[in-house]
Image (spheres, rainbow, N blue to C red):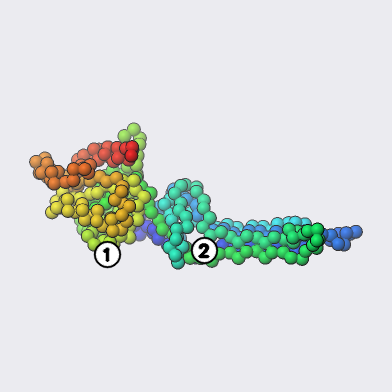
Amino acid sequence: MASNNFIDYVKINCRSGKGGAGSGHFFRAKGLPNGGPDGGDGGRGGHIILEGNSQLWTLLHLQYQKHLIAKPGESGGENLRTGAQGDDIIIQVPLGTIARDAETGEKKLEITEHGQRLILTPGGRGGLGNDHFKSATNQAPTYFQPGEPGIDEWVILELKLLADVGLVGFPNAGKSTLLSVVSAARPKIADYAFTTLTPNLGVVAYRDYKSFVMADIPGIIEGAAEGKGLGTRFLRHIERNSILLFMISVDSKDIAEEYQILLSELEQFNPDLLTKKRLLAITKADLIDDELEAEIRETLPTDLPTVFISSLANKNIMQLKDMIWQALHAKE
């Protein structure tokens, strides 16, 4: 996923089609000059529909397509002919896309499965023809319904990546390096803060041809909830992750304190994130010996599964995978 192509938030204008009018026609034929009403119904206006596509990872294709206008339905005709429906507009979106009303922020729908189709903006209903209004006391109704108008609305599409494991940590904690080692993903890696500017996904191969999906989220700093650094813009992507893997560098001044800062920032963004399963990976463990590792371990929370890893030296990477797999499949 190229960083300059990753778009996870777009605002679009959706205009569904107007319903076609019903017909007020009366049947006429030789020898039958006063036939009854035979006006058909109008066709439904076109819907605007979202469809899930597992091959998409971004909303980039919608960034410059701000106005989506569906076609109206056609009017009904004689001989009870129903007007044609307006063509629907089907928008392909990545899994994890949420649609919200731009004015109220109310959630309209979300797409979580490949091929799933949901109506975002429904088209107007077609009007009824005069045939529907005939009765014993009104055998020649001239009344027919106009079609219902379409809906004109602004909608926000927001992407939340679907992944099994979300990597959480400060900049330069080694998240991108780990993802590049355990998967085919190639995130940008450099020796400066905020190298990762957009989330990255990778499929991690496990034993016996099993696998799980890992998401590298741009680094958090203290005060992110108040907008410092990259703020909390990308934290929405870990709301759907089953497990949060906290990553802290072994050369941190106070690992336990860093962990608490990360927890605090997550809690301020969304308290529900603290209910997710948590694991801790102490990175760059090739910089210390076994004796120092034992000393550091004594300062860490005892109720948090912890592993010391080195992505460069491939130290305990398989142990980390085992720990993640067990957490993913542990019974509640």
Q: From the viewer's perspective, is residue 77 above or below residue 178?
A: below
The x and y percentages for residue 268 are 28, 58
Residue identified by numbered label 2: 14
Amino acid at pointer 1: Glu
Furthest-front residue in this view: 137
Q: From the viewer's perspective, is residue 44 above or below residue 207?
A: below
Q: Along the horizontal axis of the image, is 267 left or right of 119? A: left
The x and y percentages for residue 176 are 27, 51
Furthest-top residue in this view: 208
Q: Residue at x 67, y 65 (%)?
A: 146
The image quadrant where one finds the C terminus is top left
Instruction: Nearest to the eye among marks 2 and 1: give it.
Output: 1
Furthest-right residue in this view: 31
Q: Along the horizontal axis of the image, is 165 left or right of 108? A: left
Q: Residue at x 35, y 35 (%)?
A: 209
Q: Nearer the viewer, residue 74 or 314?
A: 74
Q: Residue at x 70, y 57 (%)?
A: 82
- Secondary structure of residue under mark 2: strand
Q: Quadrant of residue 224?
A: bottom left
Q: Nearer the viewer, residue 198 or 293?
A: 293
Furthest-left residue in this view: 291
Q: Residue at x 28, y 64 (%)?
A: 227
Residue identified by numbered label 1: 226
Amino acid at pointer 2: Cys
Q: Along the horizontal axis of the image, is 12 left or right of 217? A: right
Instruction: Classify mark 1: residues with Cα within 10 Å, few (<14), some (14-19) or many (20+).
Output: few
Q: From the viewer's perspective, is residue 319 above or below residue 93?
A: above
Specify whether residue 177 is in view. no
- Secondary structure of residue under mark 1: helix
The x and y percentages for residue 266 are 28, 55
What is the spatial separation of the Cα atoms under label 2 and label 1, in whole angstroms?
A: 33 Å
